[in-house]
Structures are given as C-alpha cells and as structure tokens.
Image (spheres, rainbow, N blue to C red):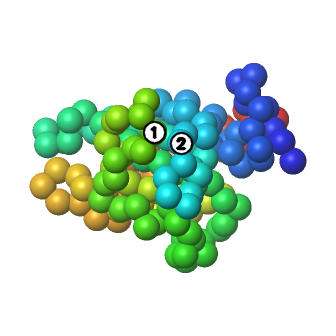
Amino acid sequence: MTAIYDGLQFKTKLEAQWAAFFDLAEWEWRVNPAPVDDWSPDFRVTFPCNHSECGGSHTLLVAVLPIDKIEEFKSHPCLRHFYGLQSVAPHEHTSICAGAAFGTSPRATTWQMSHGAGGGTEAVDDWVDHADTLWSRAASLAK
C-alpha cells in the first residue's frame, strides 16, 4: 500500500515515515539510490558527525523492511556492506560508510561503520536525540 509524504509517493507507509523522520532529524535523504550488487537500497541518507576524523558527516544506504527485531535482518544483503563501500553509479562518487537495516522504529536499526579512530555497530538512537519522539511525529506526517 503506497503512502504520501511531502508530496512524494512511497511504496509503503513505513518508507514514508522514515522519510519524514529523516527530515525531522535533519538528515539529508534520497529515495531509491542506485543498486549495489544484488541489493536495491530504499534510501541514501547523510547525517552530521562532529568527530574531527569523520569529515563532517556519514552516508548510509538503507534497506527499510517491516521488521521489529534486528535479528530478523541477519541475512539481508544490506548488512554485507559494512565499514564502507564505493557507490557503483557513475553519478554517485561519494563514499558510502555502510549498508544499514531500518525496521519499524528507530530501535530496530543497525549498521557497522568506521567512526573516528574506531567504529562498530551503530543505531539511530546513537545519532538522534529523542528519536522515539521524532518517530511518533513522523508517523503523523506520513499519510
């Protein structure tokens, strides 16, 4: 069932809600970026990072699925792309930090990327203050 957010039609209400969430969190986003191997991401998102070694932001390719628990994503191709990949589309030369899995809420998200001198497993809650509040607001914006 399709849904509308900000005049754009999305394949599902969940995707529309994520788009609204990205706007509320002040993340840059684009829907349906170029495929990577056997996976067609739903979003490309870029969010700010103030760490001196990170260049000011991180960019993810995101799969959105109606999944409540991260464990349910374990075999999804998005999670094969961790700690960076190069975009394969000629018009997208920006380095991608990771493939990411986004489920039915900010608590059902995961990716692995470099951050500062280290890195590891990340989630939306690590990067967005009051993510649950923004998620609730995003639900009311996606129709």
Residue 132 visible in the picture: no
Image point (68%, 45%), residue name: 15
Image coordinates of residue 138 in percent, x first then y, are 66, 38
Q: Nearer the viewer, residue 64 or 41?
A: 41
Image point (34%, 52%), residue name: 85
Q: Nearer the viewer, residue 31 or 92?
A: 92
Residue lying at the far right in this picture: please name it: 1
Image coordinates of residue 25 in percent, x first then y, are 49, 35
Image point (56%, 58%), residue name: 39
Q: Which residue is mark 1?
A: 89
92 over 40 or under it: above or below:
above
Q: Which mark, by number, is residue 16?
A: none
The amino acid on which the numbered mark 2 sits, given as a three-letter code, is Ala
Q: Nearer the viewer, residue 109 or 76?
A: 76
Q: Are marks 2 and 1 in contact (CB under 8 Å)?
A: yes
108 relative position to 118: left or right: right
Q: Which residue is mark 2?
A: 34
